[in-house]
Image (tube, rainbow, N blue to C red):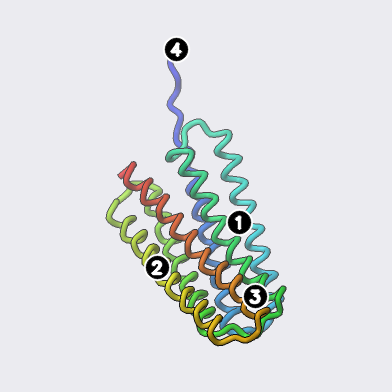
Amino acid sequence: MKFPFIPREEKFFDLFQASAQNVVEAAHRLKEMVDSWEHVEGSVDEITELEHKGDIITHDIMARLNRTFVTPFDREDIVQLAHSLDDIIDFIHAAADSMLLYKVSRPGPRAKELAGIIVQAAEEVEKVMPQIRKHIVLSQVLKRCVEINRLENVADRVYRSAMAELFADSSDIADVIKWREIYAHMESATDRCEDVADVLEGVAIKHA
């Protein structure tokens, strides 16, 4: 029996691009909130909506994966990429929501630095997505992935400095606990960007 040619499901790329764009938008909302420290509750509401939108995109990817026979790349890579993208925005939301919930004072330089790095890493994630859609040029994908990894390393150093300063400068244990959690969420967002880069690097190497 002859089987007809079954094309790869290209819709996955549209969904990954939409997810990456959603992450960038959430990252910008977080940075704007941290920088201005105005309309905090409204900013958190906006980020919450973006987080919900990300959940819907991830659910769509998983549902499509379950009914697709021929996928653009390995199923396990699709699952990991979808969840890593979703995790980025989850941690962005967790950081913003914690600032509102704990009624923290105006964020300092380290929080602003971390927010800026999250934006940069998210933008690199968005830029690399089209490069895995058609003909993969390995050097271009790897260049973006290396930059994401570099930004994660910068975020890690800023996080360590923030924690050292927090414990050295604050006599309010409650304040220490609050900001320790917030900084951890922000640093974790960059970790998840690195996870995305690792998946895409693997995909590029397999298919270049």
Residue type, label 2: Asn
Q: Quadrant of the N terminus?
A: top left
Q: Eyeballing the image, is 97 above or below 66? A: below
Residue that numbered label 3 is attached to: 178
Separation (CA) of disc 4 from disc 3: 65 Å
**Label 3: few (<14), some (14–19) or many (≥20) C-alpha neighbours in 10 Å:** some
- Across and down, in percent, residue 136 comes to 33, 48
Mark nearer the viewer, 3 or 2: 3
Compare marks 3 and 2 and give the one earlier in the sequence.
Answer: 2
Label 3: which secondary element = helix
**Residue 100 image position (x, y, % from top left):** 70, 75
Q: Secondary structure at mark 2?
A: helix
Disc 2: which residue: 153
Residue labelled with disc 1: 54
**Quadrant of the rendered image containing residue 150:** bottom left
- The residue under label 4 is 1
